[in-house]
Amino acid sequence: MNTENNRLNEWYVPKFGPRGFRIFVGMLFLPYTGMCISFAVLGSMFAIHIVWERVIAISAIYALGLGLAAHAADSLGSKTTKPWGNYFSNKQLWYMILLGLIPAYTIGAYYIIFFVPLLLVIAVLEGFFLFAYNFEVFGGFFHNNFWFSLSWGALPLIAGFIIQTNHIEALPLVFSVITGLVSYVHIRVSRKYKDYKKKGRVDCATVRLELFLKAVSLTVIFSVSAIVLSKMVIG
């Protein structure tokens, strides 16, 4: 079955609009992108004094860097089955990568130069993993669940804390391990779920996996949203 056809019925893909629009939104993997942004926002919440402008900045960086650039790179660099088939050309995908990375690194560079130079370490690491993971370089050494959970689960939380403080502490490091583990479990289940979907399975096992993925992603997003609201109200 055509990959893009098979995935248009995913729960996070809009049921309305032109086919290209639906595939583009699906390619953004909004539930996991939302989780990653939530981890970065959660990292900022560990700071004693929160600069809300920087919360918005780190959210935008990961929305552009992961949501758009990394997922376009995944569609471009996959050596086997393309996540969304071949609907977008290589040229279009490169445009998406650049449209994500240029503003993301511009925002990051501003804060690195003027406020938080330690963020440069995270920027370099995330840039490396974006290409190493999605383009399966070094024989695909970095294209596995561990490096995925480190780059998009643990590092975002650390980045969120660093953009507020320009240093690192034990508590956010501990929580970065937790968010990394959440990402690890999520991607393992997601891979199994996608395999079932490719095979056209619509049985109870597939439904249970989908419900689990929904529960994890939405729980993370809403929990962090509640923490942010409480911080804004209580301080």
Image: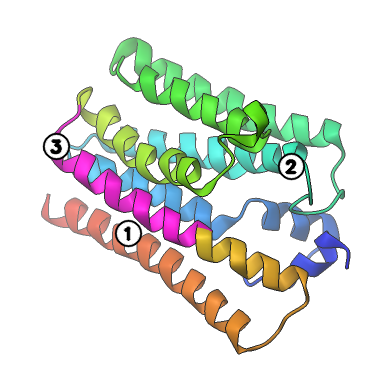
Q: Point out residue 231 in the picture as x, y percentages from the top left corner.
A: 18, 52
Q: Is residue 210 above or below residue 166?
A: below
Q: Amino acid at mark 3?
A: Ala
Q: Quadrant of residue 78?
A: top right
Q: Distance from label 2 to label 1 (Cα)?
A: 33 Å
Residue that sits furthest to the bottom in the current view = 204
Q: Is residue 193 above or below residue 31?
A: below
Is residue 8 at all visible to an observer of this figure?
A: no
Q: Which residue is mark 1?
A: 225
Left or right? Give the position of 152 relative to 111.
right
Q: Distance from label 3 to label 2 (Cα)?
A: 36 Å
Q: Is residue 146 above or below residue 35?
A: above
Q: Which residue is mark 2?
A: 78
Closer to the N terminus: mark 3 or mark 2?
2
**Label 1 secondary element:** helix
Q: Which residue is mark 3?
A: 170
Closer to the N terminus: mark 2 or mark 1?
2
Left or right? Give the position of 129 relative to 92.
left
Q: Distance from label 1 to label 3 (Cα)?
A: 23 Å
For the magenta stretch, what is the residue range?
168-187
Which label number is shown at residue 181? none
Q: Nearer the viewer, residue 111 or 150?
A: 150
Asked whether the residues under the numbered discs 2 and 1 touch, taking CB atoms below 8 Å apart as contact, a structural biologist would say no
Residue visible at 82% across and 35% down in the picture: 92
